Image (cartoon, rainbow, N blue to C red):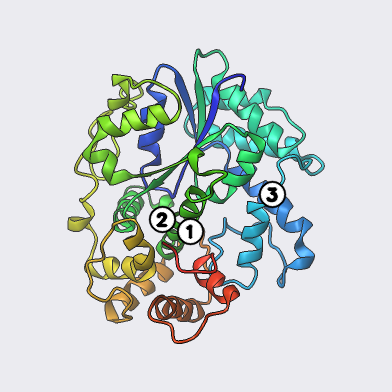
Amino acid sequence: MTGPLPFFIFGVARSGTNLVARMLDAHPHAAVALDPLLPLFRSWRNQVAEQSAHTLTGAWNPQSSLQDYYFSRDGAALLRMILDADPAQALPPGGLEHLQPAVVDRAALESPNLAAAFAKWTGSTWGELLASTVRIISDGKAVHAAGVKEVWTVEFIPAIRRALPDARFIILHRDPRAVAASQMAMARKDPTQAAHSISYMRHWRKHVTLARLFSSDSSLGDQVLEVRYEDILLSPKQHAENLAGFLGLDFDPAMLAPGKEQGWESNSSFTSAKGGVDAQAGERWRGKLPAHAVATVEFHCGIEMRNLGYEPTRAEPGRLDAEVLRGIAESNAAPGKWRSDSGDEAADLAWECLRWQLAGPAAVDVPSDLMRRCFLQPELPN
């Protein structure tokens, strides 16, 4: 390998990805860009879908939100297309000219300097654009590792690894109840950040399922590190050492004061402590999230939660009751700017109930295509 080691940090929004990115960016031999590549991943997804549109049962909408792949007749097929995406595929005509302004605008949200540097972005394939991104992030810096933090797009890991065979991938998990509480707090501060909470939950369990698949892949697993946000808060030094070591770096104490020089307001939506790790953030949802919201999160995520050690508070998290229905109604009444469900609320609720039925004792073998529509894989997630 020549040049810095490429790495990527993935998770859902509000899951702790900023904390990890800033911890690593504080290291003198690492550099991290925050969220510049969402336009690239959307465009890459659209090209993959459009080239195989004849295999899909419905018309492809390039303006659709990033998918969670649950329940849709085409969900499993689209997910497989992205998992198999070829980074050597040429960009569509005018691809770079279309993408560059969007990536510049996206990068400018966090760093005007990085946005300006994307004027040097070059490439005629998706893989070349990824390699160019790593060079831009490390340009002029004496770094041994250069990374990108992104949300929602963990399914691109196999394709990125085909483009950058030495790349490392850090996947953040956080209790979905804490994710929901953080997202709601952010929306109260800034109403433009309001989002469809059920779509958040569906993306959360997508990340859990795909992370487990990647970690268990013998050809990929040693390049994937799964980390629970709560564990970082409990033992920040130990996990900073683990993160550094995963990238071939020695621990540096600066990692324990992430974002201090930039005035970052800690890792919490509820406090304004400057440049540090808020150790209380992991459990604060217990005093912030209403009971009906807790019930709704556990109804949608309870199967996958237990696989990460997040124990539901309800004895029967899969029970459909008035609390769950209230939470679903609130989510659908204020969906924000995007949603990844079908929009048919009754149909999606029926699918959620079926997930719980399939997760229980099964009297008959369940067709693999039905399991994939419910769990993104032909068996229950573990």
At label 2, the amino acid type is Ala
Q: Is residue 127 left or right of residue 272?
A: right
Q: Please say if 262 is above or below 215.
A: above
Q: Which circle, 3 or 2, is nearer the viewer?
A: 3
Circles 3 and 2 in contact, beta carbons < 8 Å: no
Q: Nearer the viewer, residue 281 or 80?
A: 80
Coordinates of residue 136 in the picture (x, y in percent) = 60, 23
- The dot on residue 206 is 1
First along the sequence among labels 1 and 3: 3
Q: Which circle, 1 or 2, is nearer the viewer?
A: 1
At label 1, the amino acid type is Lys
Local crowd at mark 2 within 10 Å, few (<14), some, or many (≥20)?
some
Coordinates of residue 323 in the picture (x, y in percent) = 27, 76
Say if residue 342 shows up in the picture.
no
Circles 1 and 2 in contact, beta carbons < 8 Å: no
The residue singled out by tag 3 in the image is 85
Residue at x 29%, y 73% (from the top left corner): 317
Coordinates of residue 73 in the picture (x, y in percent) = 63, 73
- The dot on residue 194 is 2
Estimate the spatial distance between the alpha carbons at disc 1 and disc 3, rounded to whole Å: 18 Å
Estimate the spatial distance between the alpha carbons at disc 3 and disc 2, rounded to whole Å: 32 Å
Local crowd at mark 3 within 10 Å, few (<14), some, or many (≥20)?
many
Task: Tell me the quarter of the picture where residue 167 sits.
Answer: top right
Location of the N terminus by quadrant is: top right
